[in-house]
Amino acid sequence: MAGTSKTIELPNPLPLDGGGELARAQLAYQTYGTLNEDRSNAILLCHALTGDQHVASPHPVTGKPGWWERMVGPGKPIDTDRYHVICANVIGSCMGSTGPASLAGDGTPYAMRFPVITIRDMVRALVGLLDALGIEKLHTVVGGSMGGMQALSLAANWPERAARVLVIASTSRHSAQNIAFHELGRQAIMADPRWNKGDYYGGEAPDNGLAVARMAAHITYLSEEALTAKFGRNLQDRPDGTRGAKSFGFDADFQVESYLRYQGNGFTQRFDANSYLYITRAMDYFDLAEENGGKLANAFAGTAARFCLVSFDSDWLYPTAESRHVVRALNAAGAAVSFVELSAPHGHDSFLLDVPALDRVVKGFIE
Amino acid sequence: MSLRPDLEAIAGAIGAGSRVLDIGCGDGALLANLRDTKQVDARGMEIDGTCVERCVAQGLSVVQGDANRDLADYPDKGFDYAVLSQTLQTALRPDLMLDQLLRVGRQAFVSFPNFAHWRTRSALMLHGRMPVTRAIPVSWYETPNIHHVTVSDFRELARQKGAHVEREWFFANGSPVRAGVNLRAEFAVFQLSR
């Protein structure tokens, strides 16, 4: 479907959790569907780590379908015939919003001069966008994975801005294991000599490091069951068409190796390595309880929003226990909350894939 | 849609605009009824994911959880009424669950199949078999009912817990039973406070 792609510059400097502010922050965003007269049908979608604003229209770089086309569109669970859907590229990213690849005041890319940002900073920018669009209160804020962190952050810090909060396969804090995997990815990027302390714009980018980071992360997005079902120990056929066999070398003998290399390389075509550093950092710093005196329930005290949390039984990146932890806090705060653990084989990526039960829950919750 | 008799009794006794937690809410029939007819702030807990999905699809606030464990997450007296319909007999520790019920709700409703109903008694006495009746329709080896209870047993538990019986209802074959309830009632509903 066709979306409308726009960019705005926030009128005011964006205050940042790390101190200081980001001047002239730009946000690139897409909208689908029509905003109704009383501006009450807006749904904000928050994207995941390497996602972007191209939710339900082809990606301009890869030409692939939008990342949530199965969920968003006319007659789909998030029905663009009824709702005005907004999705903005987060600050720190690289699809049109201000990030480390953007030009600083001196006309050269920020690179590592870009300030370290937080999830709350991303959301503060999104709230700035809503202000600019004249949307006082969202019908729903929706997010999966890092998008779910943004939805929770919005609910906690700007509770009057959303009537419904839908959080899928997400968490209120990064665990030691989550941080560890991100650190692995960052070290892979920074160990690539082309990274050059972040100063590589105009030259060769640290694609090897970024590809390794993506390969490691991709493993965490899939369940062991899904990897086994998809690849098992199958061997990869050679490019000349001969049957796969062990090479007694270090080519991609196994299909799973070939797949990961393909995923890693493909990712470097569309993503900036420094953005990967900054956004993973923001996720690692995320701890909604810490922002609220160590008690997660305080984050939601007095909230009037309705919440729905969804986890997947095969997700070991943000397992069901993390969603339950949020549900417990919401119950303690007396909030209206629904929670369901859905059964799906794909692991963390289930929220992006074909899980009909998720469609029904999303549709039912936002109606 | 008409409600089960025990739910009908509970729905009739719940005040408009109150806060209700239905524990083991199934497909949300009671919650939807209370929301639609009495503007009740209705919440539920249900262990079965498919049931939870159906509840959420109706716009109900229902949490997938195990009442044996997850009731502890709710604040004291956060609800006007806590409802436990046809679930007490499936609890790991019905006594502890009753404590939780009386903690999270100002009042509690408990409904259960009465194991002392004459059909149940006769199955055991005449045939020496575990009863399979209209009220208890599942064989002993696959029933979720792990703590069968009678009307008299429940009264005694409530007394031990210091709970006051506000109201009680008894049913057999969908109709009220008023006398000889421990023998004649298939189902019992108690409204308690503490």
Image: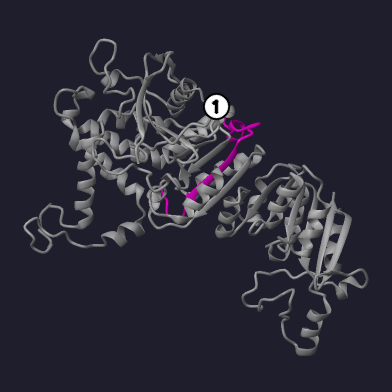
At x 29% / y 23%, what residue is drawn?
A100
Residue B159 on image: x %, y %: 87, 58
Q: Which residue matches tag 1?
A: A157
- Percent across and percent down for residue A44 are 47, 34
Q: Is residue B109 above or below residue A131?
A: below
Q: Residue drawn at (56%, 44%), measured in percent from left and top?
A: A367
**A87 within the magenta span:** no
Residue A293 visible in this rendered orientation of the protein:
no
Kind of residue sitting beneath label 1: Asn
Q: Chain of mark 1?
A: A
Which of A136/B60 is in front? A136
Q: Is residue B91 visible?
A: yes
Answer left or right for A169 relative to A164.
left
Kindly indicate the quadrant of the structure image that contains residue B18.
top right
Quadrant where the N terminus of chain B sits is: bottom right
- Is residue A223 rendered to the left or right of residue A239? right
Residue displayed at 71% across by 55% down = B30
Which residue in the rendered view is the most extreme toward the bottom?
B127
Res. A31 image quadrant: top left
Give the residues drawn in magenta, as a range: A289-316
- Residue at coordinates 40% horizontally, 42% vertically from top-left? A177
- Position of residue A126 relative to residue B25, above or below, is above
